[in-house]
Amino acid sequence: MDLTQIFPVVAVMLGFGIAIPLVSYSYKKNAKNAGTLGEQIIASAEKEARSIIKEKELEAKDESIKIIQKANIEAQEKLQEVRESQRNISNREMKLDNKSENLDRKELEIRKVEAQVSQELKEVEIEKISYDKLVEEENQKLEHIARMTKDEAKNTLIENMKEIALVEASVVTKQIKDSAIANATKEANKIVISAIQRSAADHTAESTVSVVELPSDQMKGRVIGREGRNIRTFEQLTGVELIVDDTPEAVVLSGFDPVRREIARVALTNLVQDGRIHPARIEEMIKKATKDVDEEMRIAAEEALAELHLPAFHAQIMKLIGRLKYRTSYGQNILKHSIEVGWLTGLMAAELNMDGVLARRAGFLHDIGKAIDRNTDGTHALIGGEYARKYGEPDAVINAIESHHEEVPMTGPISALVQSADAISGSRRGARGDTLESYIKRLRNLEGIATGFEGVSKSYAIQAGREVRVMVESDKIDDLKAQSLSLDIAGKIEDEMTYPGQIKVVVIRESRNTAIAK
């Protein structure tokens, strides 16, 4: 091995020999320093801990002092409350003792009063027995003098007092009734007369025409057609019966529905004027007549609303209003009657400071049910009310429609005005036509109702059935009964008869005394 190889080895060994003592010395020195630092840290921590403990002890001592002070204050307050309660209880006990003494004293007084009252009751009972005995003796004397028992005298007295009471009550009732009728009649006449004077409607209206004039009798054959084909086609399309008889230069249209009858009349009139009468032309003319009549009904409805200054109704209501143009009741045109009732209702409402527009609307629609097809069940008032309700009319209008014949109760003053206006319009002289047979029948029914009462000898219907005069037997009916008889007859007429306007019942009692001088 040469020197170059030995030298590095020796150098390494020398390095290790020097390094080991150096490292050992450095480690010992660091360990000593670390021990000194640890001791310092521990001493500092112990000092800080003692400071914190001392501080917390002071805080705990202050907190405990505060708690003790608070507890002492609360204890003082509770003690004060207990003492106050004790004083209140003592006061109450004193008051109760005083009340108990008062009650005892009052109880003694009550017992004394009860004893006194008991003694007085005994005395009263003794006096009552003595009084009853005295009354019994007096009654026996009176019965002996009057020759009547006590019950007979009592009944006689009751009957006498009843008669006196009835007479006095009748007089008072008559005075009240006469005063009420006078005042009500005065005001009602004022309102009605004012409304009638301001409403200048015609009394009567023309009836729907059902006769078509022909230029000659030869036209009848053309109307009938070959083997009757023209008349069959016409009747089938219109639903109206065409009567061709011996009436010169005229044919008659017969049908229940006045609108269909009017369509048939217009169509037949146009066919006669045109001259070309065959099934195809008949169908064409009927379609044209239907449009013309619908247009006339629409115009009639709009004119009626314009005349009454009313806003438009629902489209279905407007159609029904137009149909009223061809409806009649006792010969009175329903549309003109409805317009008149609308005006009368509105005028009377204005006199009473009520809503005139609503009143005219209710009066105008009161007979709208008469325009509805006859296949609908029910009276025209109830049907009309149902349609008005269906198409949004106000409640006041609906009730006026349904109650104008008293089929439902009235709920407002407008309903009463509509009923009055309807009676005024229908009862005008000449407003409605009537057959002789029905007129005589109504008069007979009126007289029959009056003569059906006991004590009535004769009855006469006068003024076209507007008044009935009843003659009674004076020995059976006195003045008091005569007054009640008139009310009974009027009530029965209202229940059993149907009539426009009012019927006056006059009961006449007459006494005749005859003597002969010889």
Image (cartoon, rainbow, N blue to C red):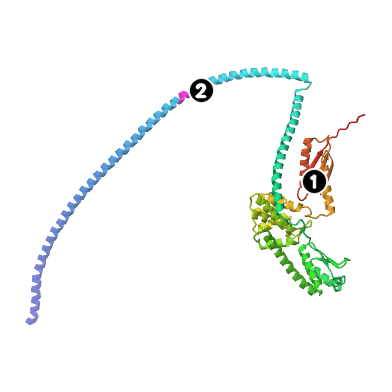
Disc 1 residue type (three-letter): Glu
Q: Is residue 463 magenta?
A: no
Which residue corresponds to mark 2? 107
Residue 489 drawn above or below residue 298: above
Residue 517 versus residue 425 in the image, above or below: above
Which residue appears at 85% of the width and 34% of the height? 512
Q: Tell me what residue is drawn at x 69 percent, y 55 percent.
A: 343
Q: CA distance from mark 1 to mark 2?
A: 80 Å
Q: Is residue 455 left or right of residue 387?
A: right
User: Whole-percent x and y of residue 431?
Assistant: 77, 55
The kind of residue tagged 2 is Glu
Asked if marks 1 and 2 touch (Cβ < 8 Å), the reply is no
Question: Which residues lie in the magenta part?
Answer: 99-108
Reading the image, the residue beneath label 1 is 467
Q: Main secondary structure of the magenta part?
A: helix
Labelled disc at residue 103: none
Disc 1 secondary structure class:
strand
Q: Position of residue 169 (x, y in %)?
A: 72, 34
Where, quadrant-wise, is the C terminus in this rendering? top right
Residue 5: image quadrant is bottom left
Q: Quadrant of residue 33?
A: bottom left
Query: How many neighbours does mark 1 have within 10 angstroms: few (below 14), some (14-19), or many (20 or more)?
Result: some
Q: Residue furthest front?
A: 197
